[in-house]
Amino acid sequence: NRPRVDRCETTARRPLRTDRASTAGASTRRTMALRLVLLAAAATALDDGLALTPPVGYRTWNAYAGDIDDALIRTVADALVKKRPSPWTNSEVSLADLGFSRLGIDDGWQACGTGWQDSFHAEDGTPLVNGTRFPDLKQLVAYGNAAGLVVDWYEGNCICMDAYTLRANASWAAAAYAKDVDQVYDNGFAGVKIDNCGDDDAAGFVTRVNNIKNRSTPVLIENSNQGMGWGPPKGLPTDPDGWCDMHMYRVGGDIGPDFDGCVARLQNVVPFTNTTPISRPGCWAYADMLEVGNFGFGEAGNDDDRSFIESRTHFGLWCVASQPLMLGLDVTDDARVDAVWPILSNAEAVAVNQAWAGHP
């Protein structure tokens, strides 16, 4: 039998039933007070109203790496909104109902090597999409939106193979970075993960972010810098009241389906969570995507009970540390999702993650 979910690891004990009328006023006051705290803390970040609480959603990389296409993304969207019986309530809920309503498309969409100078950008800077894999991005985003999801994008370089080609021609690179941002807005994406692999001089990150900041509608910005460097133009924030040109930022290298490695990644967040925290609303330190459900489930000889405990602990740690919660398991695999459903469906744990009120 599957071990019982210990709520002490993932959230506080369920509240006692009380008279709703007697608690409504107190609840409203607490909500308003928390909102004021979040808005005040975000004032020195991008100050665009986004990511006042840690972003919650899904990204494709941990489950599928670069092997993605339109059909898969639609299937993932369907899986995120699929209802399942909740072990915590007498209702059915979906991952999207629980807050995991951002669908992030990661690396693997580009027509690598088909553009100018063997890049995936045309001579005018337009990013070239693999049309066999993704025939119509706008329709794909519309499909996600119709399901109640927002869809995020990835700006990078064919698994680290393109940035140096762009950097060899500054004017072409500037045009390409501007066209990258056009692609985000033209197709209706709500956020973008900017991968800094190869962007050694930070021109790619800075130019894209500046183009985003010049738009009337903000999008969520993830700085996937893997913890390289400090301060402007693309490093890690250093000042609780200072520069933070992103809504979330990686503080270490790539995570993997290894429990000890996940815990080690989380330690990189500690310097950002002091009494006056650098990680704050609108500017979240990020240990990387979740590996919940990826610790060997279903593999020959694997101890699935241990994998469940590791996934539960991993999820709980990310919740109490105010981490962006980006799922990375194969959500199209019902057996895998069912194996960790008591963890993912714990709305109280997600609520703890979202109720940031300062560190520690």
Image (cartoon, rainbow, N blue to C red):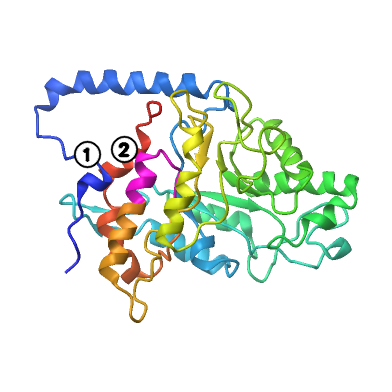
Residue that mark 1 sits on: 12
Q: Residue at x 37, y 36 (%)?
A: 354
Q: Residue at x 9, y 27 (%)?
A: 19
First in residue order: circle 2 vs circle 1: 1
Label 1 crowding class (10 Å Cα cut-off): few <14, some 14-19, many 20+? Answer: few
Q: Position of residue 169 (x, y in %)?
A: 90, 50
Q: Position of residue 299 (x, y in %)?
A: 37, 78
Picture layout, residue 177 above or below residue 70:
above
Q: CA distance from mark 2 to mark 1?
A: 8 Å
Say if residue 188 shows up in the picture: no
Quadrant, the N terminus = bottom left
Q: Is residue 319 left or right of residue 64?
A: left
Q: Residue at x 69, y 38 (%)?
A: 234
Badge 2 amino acid = Val
Q: Residue at x 66, y 43 (%)?
A: 185
In-front residue for pair 310/168: 310
In-front residue for pair 53/123: 53
Residue that mark 2 sits on: 352
In the structure shown, which secondary structural element does the residue marked by tag 1 occupy?
Answer: loop
Which stretch appears magenta? 315-326
Q: Position of residue 204 (x, y in %)?
A: 76, 45
In the structure shown, which secondary structural element does the residue marked by tag 2 occupy?
Answer: helix
Q: Position of residue 350 (x, y in %)?
A: 33, 43
Picture layout, residue 147 above or below residue 298:
above
Quadrant, the C terminus = top left
Picture layout, residue 114 above or below residue 156:
below
Determine which quarter of the picture holds residue 106.
Answer: bottom right
Determine which quarter of the picture holds residue 233.
Answer: top right
Label 2 crowding class (10 Å Cα cut-off): few <14, some 14-19, many 20+? Answer: some
Whether tag 2 and tag 1 are in contact, CB under 8 A, the answer is yes
